[in-house]
């Protein structure tokens, strides 16, 4: 009798424990719900670009977003060199295929205790092959996302949250991407040889680029005209 | 001395051929500007071919007055030396061919001083020509295309320079280009001393510039390692060094120059060449038997 009651107690404890931990599907659902609270936003911030073959000044930018997947980064002043693929800055773009993906629960990352969830689109021709999300379950926000695409390599997002965490909007985003080859035919530019070109081979080896946007303010759900996304 | 200088300058600007250079420069710059105004996007596309695959870059914004000026100088500063040679190559040989050289050296001024005055007048003409280029290439381009950040494309990587950080670079670049053109003027002036007609020194200068420019731009390792570092045409491109900026983690450092010592070295090499050419001219002219 005593043995049976012990079994029952253990079973009850296990049931209670499993009830407190959410499934990967539930976590994804909560994240999506949070992100879907934002229909549009206009955010001000500073953008720092780090690509080996170009030097760009830090830019004051305005980032416009409108659901489901419109995103535009505009320099307030100066040349606007925005890396391709920055539409992936919008976390909502991870879920644009609706629920048409398989979810794999990888467990928790040692050290950070972030929940790792992989999403595999079911559509065979989808550009995104795999998305891996690192989720802070307490705040229910995505802290890191890795997206592997068919055509454009792998994108990585590192996000730091502050006062807009309730909307799933980060205060700081570091967007890493694969850069394409930089080739300019010799003779087009008549370069002055100041001795700096000896470093070229090393420069070209690093094929990763980074964009860091630090947001100063968001204006959420106030409406963003479509023209913003079409204008040059 | 001042009076002699004024006379030499007067002689330069009295000749109609002097104004050919000004007219040609204005015409070429206008041609470039009109071409870029109506078909510049394609050209910018070529310059940005290394960036277009990674960035969404706004061609319209790249094609601004500062970019057009940079491009114009890129094209022109190879050809302006030819226009400089037109005058500097005529300074002594022109007098010889007209039969006035003997008259001039008969004046109570030493031959060395006379040559220095004539060379200074050539430099004055060169600098006026350069100011003319600056007015057309920079001011007119800014008026026609407006201003924005400047994209400078290089084989080893591009720079974007904030619009507020551009003007002083142009000023420095024009000063440097002035040194380069004075070197060409000195070369042409030196040839002028050896000849009795103007065609020879002008053609000789043009030939030297063409050959040296080809050697500078051919990018053949054998010449790059042996000859190129010693050619004055290599160092004449030093004005571009003011548009190569330093970067920290990919971010342009405002007010910086990537390799300032290299620019200073190029400037000094040009000055040494100019001094050498003038010295050779004086040395030869002092012992020259003037018969014309």
Image (tube, coloured by chain):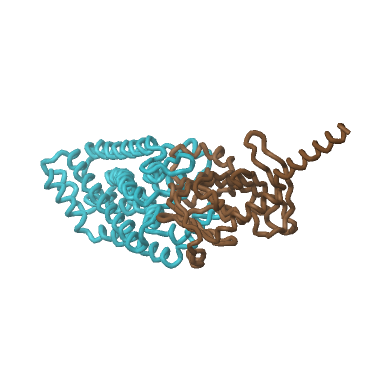
Q: Quadrant of the N terminus of chain A?
A: top right
Residue B23, visible in the rendered structure: yes
In the image as oriented, which residue stretches furthest toward the top?
A: A2
Chain letter for cyan? B
Q: Residue at x 56, y 51 (%)?
A: A168
Residue B201, visible in the rendered structure: no
Q: Position of residue A67 (x, y in %)?
A: 57, 62
Q: Nearer the viewer, residue B131 or B114?
A: B131
Going by the image, does A61 lie left or right of A183?
A: left
Q: Residue at x 57, y 54 (%)?
A: A90
Name chain A's colour.
brown
Q: Position of residue A190 (x, y in %)?
A: 45, 48
Quarter of the image for residue A13 reads top right
In the image as oriented, which residue stretches furthest toward the front?
A: A1
Q: Position of residue A94 (x, y in %)?
A: 64, 54
Q: Nearer the viewer, residue B253 or B96?
A: B253
Quarter of the image for residue A20 reads top right
In the image as oriented, which residue stretches furthest toward the right?
A: A1
Going by the image, does B279 lie left or right of A99?
A: left
Q: Nearer the viewer, residue A158 or B235?
A: A158
Q: Is residue B59 above or below residue A112?
A: below
Q: Position of residue B119 (x, y in %)?
A: 23, 44
Q: Nearer the viewer, residue B43 or B84?
A: B43
Q: Residue at x 11, y 47 (%)?
A: B3
Instruction: Report the number of discs.
Output: 0
């Amino acid at each position: 009798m005593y043995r049976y009651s012990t079994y029952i107690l253990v079973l009850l404890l296990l049931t209670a424990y499993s009830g407190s931990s959410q499934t990967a599907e539930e976590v994804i659902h909560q994240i999506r719900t949070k992100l879907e609270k934002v229909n549009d936003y206009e955010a001000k911030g500073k953008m720092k670009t780090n690509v080996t073959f170009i030097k760009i000044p830090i830019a004051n930018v305005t980032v416009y977003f409108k659901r489901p997947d419109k995103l535009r980064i505009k320099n307030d002043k100066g040349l606007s060199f925005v890396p391709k693929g920055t539409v992936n800055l919008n976390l909502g773009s991870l879920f644009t295929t609706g629920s048409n993906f398989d979810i794999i629960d990888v467990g928790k990352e040692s050290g950070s205790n972030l929940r790792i969830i992989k999403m595999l689109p079911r559509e065979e021709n989808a550009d995104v092959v795999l998305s891996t999300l690192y989720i802070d379950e307490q705040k229910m926000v995505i802290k890191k996302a890795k997206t592997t695409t068919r055509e454009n390599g792998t994108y990585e997002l590192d996000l730091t949250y502050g006062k807009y965490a309730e909307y799933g909007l980060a205060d700081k985003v570091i967007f890493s991407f694969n850069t394409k080859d930089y080739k300019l035919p010799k003779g087009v530019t008549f370069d002055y040889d100041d001795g700096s070109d000896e470093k070229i081979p090393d420069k070209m080896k690093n094929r990763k680029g980074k964009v860091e946007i630090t947001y100063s303010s968001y204006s959420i759900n106030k409406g963003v005209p479509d023209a913003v996304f079409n204008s040059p | 001395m001042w009076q002699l200088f004024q006379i030499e300058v007067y002689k330069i600007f009295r000749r109609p051929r002097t104004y050919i250079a000004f007219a040609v420069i204005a015409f070429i710059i206008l041609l470039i500007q009109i071409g870029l105004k109506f078909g510049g996007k394609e050209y910018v596309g070529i310059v940005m071919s290394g960036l277009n695959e990674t960035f969404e870059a706004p061609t319209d914004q790249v094609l601004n007055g500062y970019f057009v000026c940079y491009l114009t100088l890129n094209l022109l500063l190879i050809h302006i030396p030819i226009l400089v040679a037109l005058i500097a190559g005529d300074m002594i040989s022109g007098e010889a061919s007209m039969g006035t050289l003997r008259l001039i050296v008969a004046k109570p001024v030493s031959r060395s001083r006379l040559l220095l005055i004539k060379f200074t007048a050539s430099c004055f003409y060169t600098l006026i020509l350069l100011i003319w280029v600056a007015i057309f290439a920079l001011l007119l381009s800014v008026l026609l295309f407006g201003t924005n950040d400047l994209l400078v494309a290089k084989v080893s990587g591009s720079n974007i320079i904030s619009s507020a950080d551009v003007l002083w670079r142009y000023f420095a670049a024009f000063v440097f280009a002035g040194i380069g053109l004075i070197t060409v003027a000195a070369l042409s002036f030196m040839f002028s001393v050896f000849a009795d007609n103007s065609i020879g020194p002008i053609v000789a200068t043009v030939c030297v510039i063409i050959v040296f420019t080809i050697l500078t731009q051919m990018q053949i390792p054998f010449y790059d390692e042996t000859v190129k570092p010693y050619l004055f045409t290599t160092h004449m491109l030093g004005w571009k060094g003011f548009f190569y900026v330093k970067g920290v983690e990919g971010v342009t450092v405002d007010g910086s120059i990537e390799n300032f010592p290299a620019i200073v070295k190029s400037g000094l090499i040009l000055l040494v060449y100019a001094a050498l050419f003038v010295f050779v001219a004086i040395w030869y002219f002092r012992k020259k038997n003037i018969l014309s």
